[in-house]
Image (cartoon, rainbow, N blue to C red):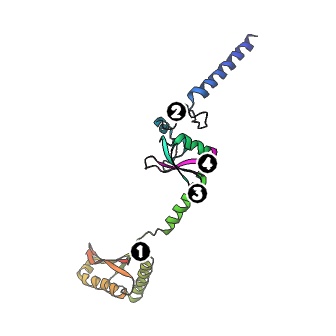
């Protein structure tokens, strides 16, 4: 009998503990139904922002994470509803089974729109991918040669330079000089000038004329804009 009473008291205290934790210690979730908007912690309370649990701070600010007390609202039909209390705007989004998303947080008051956030995010990612595809990264392709280069190798280098320039890349031609070859640097300059002459038909500009850099003679070419 005593054991049964002990177990009953044990389960009673466990239940009481769980009730206390669920109602007082856990973080409360804001509610925006008509019956809940009068709660003490409501939109506009800056303490809400301290509970921002977004993993990616670049993602959209939406729903209860919006700090402003008012927003310039655009509804799901694209109509400008003017300045609306944020709690009311979130209620409108909730009623439409959609989200309230800040699309221009830098205005005063910020501009928010009622929309399908999943679809909105997909469209943004799609546009970002398309913009990335259109971007062209300009690389500097390096061509290293000796001034004693034979005719065949020279023609191979000419074709490589033509390909790089047509692809929109810059080209750095390096005529290497080793040991006593420094005494014949004029031959390296002559070879660099020969490249300039033979590539004259390409849409390119001489970014840097042939010059001596250390033990090498260099020439920089770039495609015309």
Looking at the image, tell me whether mark 2 or mark 3 is earlier in sequence order.
2
Q: Which mark is residue 169?
A: 1
Q: Label 2 to label 3, Cα distance in Å? A: 32 Å
Q: Is residue 175 above or below residue 103?
A: below
Element at label 2: loop
Q: Is residue 96 magenta?
A: yes
Q: Which mark is residue 41?
A: 2
Mark 3 lies on residue: 122
Q: Is residue 163 above or below residue 19?
A: below
Q: Is residue 97 left or right of residue 214?
A: right
Mark 4 lies on residue: 98
Of circles 2 and 3, which is in front? 2
Q: Is residue 197 above or below residue 217?
A: below
Looking at the image, tell me whether mark 2 or mark 1 is earlier in sequence order.
2
In front here: 134 or 118? 118
Of circles 2 and 1, which is in front? 2
């Amino acid at each position: 009998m005593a054991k049964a009473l002990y177990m009953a008291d044990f389960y009673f205290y466990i239940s009481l503990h769980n009730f206390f934790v669920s109602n007082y210690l856990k973080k409360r979730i804001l509610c925006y139904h008509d019956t809940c908007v009068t709660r003490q912690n409501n939109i506009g309370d800056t303490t809400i922002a301290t509970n921002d649990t977004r993993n990616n701070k670049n993602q959209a600010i939406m729903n209860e994470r919006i700090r402003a007390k008012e927003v310039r609202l655009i509804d799901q039909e694209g109509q400008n509803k003017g300045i609306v209390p944020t709690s009311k705007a979130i209620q409108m989004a909730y009623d439409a089974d959609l989200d309230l998303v800040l699309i221009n947080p830098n205005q005063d008051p910020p501009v928010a729109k009622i929309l399908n956030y999943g679809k909105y995010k997909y469209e943004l990612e799609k546009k970002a991918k398309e913009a990335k595809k259109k971007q062209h990264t300009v690389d500097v392709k390096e061509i290293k040669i000796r001034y004693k280069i034979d005719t065949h190798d020279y023609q191979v280098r000419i074709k490589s330079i033509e390909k790089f320039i047509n692809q929109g890349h810059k080209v750095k031609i390096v005529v290497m000089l080793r040991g006593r070859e420094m005494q014949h640097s004029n031959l390296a300059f002559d070879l660099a000038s020969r490249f300039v002459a033979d590539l004259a038909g390409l849409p390119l500009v001489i970014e840097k004329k042939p010059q001596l850099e250390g033990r090498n003679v260099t020439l920089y070419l770039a495609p015309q804009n």
